[in-house]
Image (cartoon, helix red, strand yellow):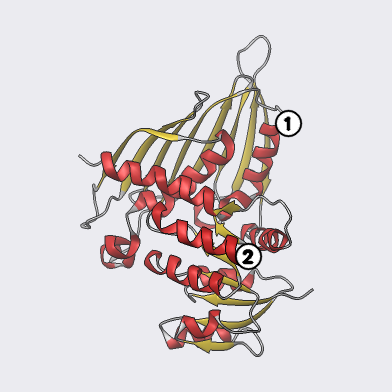
Amino acid sequence: MVRRVAIVGCGLVGAKRARALGDSRLVAVADTEPDRARALAGQAEGCVAETDWRAVVKRPDVELVIVATTHDSLVPITQAAVEAGKHVLVEKPAARRPSELGAVAAAARERGVTVRVGFNHRFHPALRQARAMVEDGAVGPLMYVRARYGHGGRAGYEREWRARPEVAGGGELLDQGVHLIDLARWFAGDLALVAGHLGTFFWDMPVEDNAFVLLRSPAGRVAWLHASWTEWKNLFSFEVFGRAGKLQVDGLGGSYGPERLTHYRMRPEMGPPDTRDWEYPGDDPSWGEEYASFVEATLGRATANATLEDAAAALTIVQQAYGGARP
């Protein structure tokens, strides 16, 4: 069954989403920049380009809507698409604050449609394998997670929309840090903020360029996370520690380096662990895997996609950090 899709937001992420649609058909796109909308529409036969997203989400031939805009527009577009009876895949973080998601969730229940949130890191092969291994007991009972994620920005970064709190809703914690929060919850369960520190060390902007947070679950599991816009060499590192070993994911492909999973299995006599590595070369498959899983979710099947409840839980941690972590 070919699903008919509209994409709102034709920037870098919107273009990645368009390339990952598989057998679905892109029928309409919208962007405030006409040239960008036309360029993306030109990649799919018969696709219509619009500058008004309202015209796109109300189209009767559209079944699924992907929302890939700046943070301030995520909720109103998602809400309108849901009220039009469309299933929606909205990019992370889905909103600027958790309170913005309540009306969206209520509308989705009322209309009987599916909304999922684009935390595509859940679909990176190393992270998927790591989670499966944790569930299979490969590291024993989980103790804590330690993770780092960051890049160094680019010339003029302080003038981009991510540096404007009224548009972005926050800085690096809400940008890349929310991915780490979602992954930590995916592995360790519900988490709450214990402590945090937000700093603006380098970029001349009114939002943080570094975020450090310590989280804890009711069962005593801990997550220590650092997200940075001053990571001069792009970095992704996610470590899961159990009583019988450790799993470490490094890289996401591209500028973050080869994606790799390492299993360190503790020996009964302790000492140096047994070590096994897996590498995942080639293009990043997470976008296509996530979209395919989203389609399955619209059919009522259980999937690994992040829900609005997951997004609200991650945003609650972000909001707690913003409320008490600034010096």
| Element type where label 1 sits in the image | loop
Q: Position of residue 231 (x, y in %)?
A: 37, 48
Q: Position of residue 183 (x, y in %)?
A: 54, 43
Q: Residue at x 60, y 48 (%)?
A: 259
Q: Position of residue 22 (x, y in %)?
A: 71, 70
In the current view of this chain or complex, which residue is farthest to the front?
A: 110
Q: Position of residue 155 (x, y in %)?
A: 30, 65
Q: Is residue 101 left or right of residue 135?
A: left
Asked if marks 2 and 1 touch (Cβ < 8 Å), the reply is: no
Amino acid bearing label 2? Val
Say which of 134 and 315 sits in front.
315
Q: Is residue 321 above or below residue 30?
A: above
* Residue 93 visible in image: no
Q: Is residue 216 left or right of residue 5?
A: left
Say which of 297 and 282 sits in front.
297
Mark 1 = which residue?
136
Q: Residue at x 63, y 35 (%)?
A: 262
Mark 2 = which residue?
113
Which quadrant of the rendered structure holds the N terminus?
bottom right
In the current view of this chain or complex, which residue is farthest to the right?
A: 1
Which quadrant of the rendered structure holds the C terminus?
top left
Q: Residues within 10 Å of mark 2 (few under 14, many from 20)?
A: many
**Quarter holding residue 269:** top right
Real-space Cα separation, disc 2 to disc 1, in angstroms: 33 Å
Say which of 117 and 82 sits in front.
82
Amino acid bearing label 1? Asp
> Residue 301 — which label?
none
